[in-house]
Image: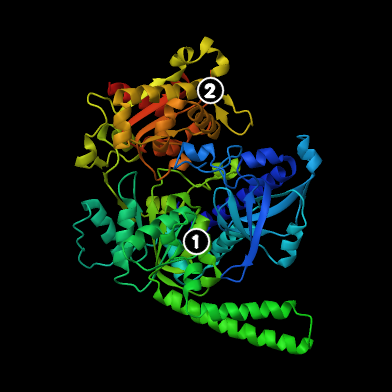
Amino acid sequence: MKESPITVLARQQALLQTEYAYEKEEFQRLTEATGIDRKVRRGMAWFPVALGRSYHNSLDQLVVEISREGARGKETSAKRLSTNGAQEGASEESGPSLFEPGKPVCFFTEDASGYRHGTGGMLRYYRFVGQVSYAEDDRMVIVLPDGDALEALRSAGRLGVQLYFDEQTYRLMFEALSDVISAKTGRLSELRDIFHGTLPARKFTFDAVRFPWLNTSQQAAVNEVLWAKDVAVVHGPPGTGKTTTLVEAIYETLRRENQVLVCAQSNMAVDWIAEKLVDRGVSVLRIGNPTRVTDKMLSFTYERRFEAHPLYQDLWAVRRAIRELYDSRSGNSESRHQKISRLKDRAAEMEFSINQTLFDDAKVIACTLAGSASHLLTGMKFGTLFIDEAAQALEAACWIAIRKAHRVVLAGDHRQLPPTIKSPEALRGGLDRTLLQAIAENKPEAVSLLRVQYRMCDTIMQFPNHEFYGGMLESAPDVKYRGILDWDTAVEWIDSKEQIPSASPGGETEDWSRESLDGLSRVNPAEAALTLETLRCYFEKIGRERILEERIDVGIISPYKGQIRLLRQLLRKDRYWRPFRSFITVNTVDGFQGQERDIIVISLVRSNAEGDIGFLRDLRRMNVAITRARMKLILLGDRSTLCRMPFYRRLAEYVDEQW
């Protein structure tokens, strides 16, 4: 018997509570027990930092600029190594920064003597919480709660900042699930029962619209979006033009509706779809802070539009007068309060007028799923909500935005990276099961699969095609047979265990995979050396001049951050790679989501007698890794370890068949 929608969502709620408790406990443990060095390496802290200028931003928030001490003016080797990697521009001593706009942060000081002696010292945390407004390689702008917080920071000694537990996002998700579960009537209860129950997903019946510039499956997907009364899913496997299709669907929807809401899980995903809509000539109002702060996107943010409004200078003058009256201690107190009250009313009127103009002019409101709960959108309803990269969003996060919509369009690929779940218990319980996945299984008639891929040559595509997509994909004619070299094989697997003795003197078992020195990940030093030697040999086959002339680009991928750090160090030290560094990106699987390269080299790391492959069992992650390559895919891994799992055995057999 099929479970009721309320039962399904109640289970999601319980699993989310488990994840919340686990993450909060883990955060407290890290805060109390983890030293500064490890926090910095994990990218969750900056220490020490220098305070810069403070000011009130366009939203009248008090903000302060901070920077990593010693970072200013330094061109780091990480930045020279790659123009695309996650560590781009970060300090060599630290890991990829996890600070993003909207994330909460806390400040701390540490006993300087403890730091000098390497003991880590005792940390003293300030009681207030800030929020990241803007973040780049070595500089951040943080919103502070009040002037007292700023004064406390000004008087501090050695100052640091770290991520704070994100209570707000969890609160929004719990509220959204509660609203959906308790809904008795209305559109929210209908959508709940369509997504998880037996209510049918209805459609309009008007004639199909032709889009000659799209392929057949893309045209069908856009029309299914237009026909959907309740829900539509655009399933976009790697390289099939999901973003192109989604932009067309949004553009065509706006011919029928005045305004739509476009969301995604991450700021980066929102920025990506927003930029494509701007390129198409659509008026976008971006709520929240883009992570890729380009001039083009800045001009479409709420803050920049707010500042550009003709009334803004008058509003700024009124706000300044209010602050001056608060700071003033002279004159009659009652009279001062009356003036402040009148000025506040005037400021509120001008803010309302500005906001009305901005939202009336925008055809697309773009924000993260959590950002859809912004006070700026209070009371607003939308005919259609588009959720991009929906396969990477928790279901609870999707419901935050769905409460504002009459119908929902989800786009993504549930065969690629799932949401990140930290609690093993919540993961076993199925918290990573997304709304897109649930609808695809419960309402398959609402799903449109994009079938033509434009990225990979056919030899690279066929294995993931049959493993993950039922053999339903096909390669576009112009990519089907392309390659870098004549008489080359597009995929190969080098058994690193067999090659390790020649790659490292003695070939001792200590060169097998092991924990990295910081205990945070895994490394395989011999395989790392073999990875670069393999790439060097392939470069010599292609020819150095041709690589530079044609700008043949390379992605080096490993599932493990420890191996990524080691590979970057080896690349940095070897003079051979200096001319090619701008063409080489080294990153994790997660860091390569949505990207592609001419050549992809994958270091799988795991090598042990027990056959333990850890989270390489997550096949969706491997699907992402092997589908980044356009013309050449090289895998390096210990077959005796990996091929105990049927998936890797089939992959090895497929590669062998190509030779």
Q: Secondary structure at mark 1?
A: helix
Q: Which part of the image, by quadrant, shows the C terminus?
A: top left
Q: Secondary structure at mark 2?
A: helix
The label shown at residue 284 is: none
Residue at 57% across / 70% down in the picture? 59
Vertical position of residue 520 compared to residue 499: above or below: below
Q: Amino acid at mark 2?
A: Pro
The label shown at residue 399 is: 1
Q: Quadrant of residue 141?
A: bottom right
Say which residue label 2 marks. 525
Q: Is residue 445 visible?
A: no
Of the image marks 1 and 2, the number of the one nearer the N terminus: 1
Vertical position of residue 162 compared to residue 317: above or below: above
Question: Residue 39's spot in the image, x, y percent?
Answer: 66, 42
Check disc 2: other Cα within 10 Å, few if <14, some if 14-19, many if 20+.
many
Q: Amino acid at mark 1?
A: Trp
